[in-house]
Amino acid sequence: MRFDVFTLFPGIFESPLKESMLKRAIESGLLEVQLHNIRDYAEGRHQVTDDYPYGGGGGMVMKPEPIFTAVEAVLGLEMRNAELGMRNETDSEFRTPHSEFPNSDFPIILLTPQGRPFDQQMAVELAQYDRVALICGRYEGFDERIREHLATDEISIGDYVLTGGELAALVVVDAVIRLKPGVLGDPTGASDDSHASGLLEYPHFTRPPEFRGWRVPEILLSGDHAKVDRWRREQALLRTWRRRPDLLDRAELSELDRAFLRQLVQE
């Protein structure tokens, strides 16, 4: 899977992409992250990428020209030429309008606090694509024409504001790529995670069986896999009920699950 990341600060990505799961995914060919410096596509000697907002106000706004040019050069012309065999990529006068971007093949996503909340279901949806473009915001945000005529979606990783979209882009890359087969060491690892089933994950224990007087639950040492599975399910329900009861409204629950929750309420 390939991510094209458009950013003013590509150096922010260097260390995370060279560590742990992301590093292994890149080395194994399961992940490709291409970083594109928006400033390289800005005109003029100073390569200006932001300007004062019309109507006044504090802060700066990211200009449309460098972002449109960057995305069209990396995605637009390439896609148009591949599909129609028209125009050479070196033709600087040729621009692909937003209406011709094949949205289903190449999501073009703005990372912005104004976007729809990023969750596990959205990660699953993005994992179905072979290629995704991420545009990292900075300053006071984007010129509105970028939202209206270039992006196909907007994502927020939470109800707070960061100094830029780079960290959010890394969150999206990490959450999505771990859903691809072969990325995690455990083939079923992603399916057991919190939110994957609609619930928070059950507690985990490992050796030693006793630490400072705190023992591992005996059922986990019993060897009875059916009982262990039911204990884990009930613990996931309990943890979700205590910490994120809102998730239970959307989770797929069996009658056995519902009976356990009714018992919790009664107690």
Image (cartoon, rainbow, N blue to C red):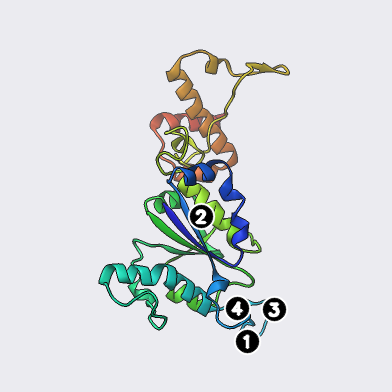
Mark 2 or mark 4: name the one nearer the start of the chain.
Answer: 4
User: Badge 1, how many Cα within 10 Å: few under 14, some, many 20+?
Assistant: few
Mark 1–mark 4 distance (CA, rounded to whole Å): 24 Å
Question: Which one is closest to the eye, mark 2 or mark 4?
Answer: 4
Q: Which mark, by number, is residue 55?
A: 1
Which image quarter: residue 50? bottom right
Marks 3 & 2, CB-CB < 8 Å contact: no
Q: Nearer the viewer, residue 198 or 6?
A: 6
Q: Which residue is mark 2?
A: 118
Mark 1–mark 3 distance (CA, rounded to whole Å): 10 Å
Mark 3 or mark 4: name the one nearer the start of the chain.
Answer: 4
Could you tell me which secondary element the residue under label 3 belongs to?
loop
Q: Which residue is mark 3?
A: 58
Q: Nearer the viewer, residue 267 or 14?
A: 14
User: Seen in the image, is 64 located left or right of residue 79?
Assistant: right
Task: Looking at this view, name the residue that lies furthest to the right.
Answer: 212
Q: Residue at x 71, y 16 (%)?
A: 213
Task: Looking at this view, name the residue that lies furthest to the top.
Answer: 222
Q: Which residue is mark 4?
A: 47
Where residue 5 appears, x then y in whole percent? 51, 61
Marks 1 & 4, CB-CB < 8 Å contact: no
Mark 1–mark 2 distance (CA, rounded to whole Å): 32 Å
Residue 158 in view here: no
Mark 3–mark 4 distance (CA, rounded to whole Å): 22 Å
User: Seen in the image, is 225 located left or right of residue 245?
Assistant: left
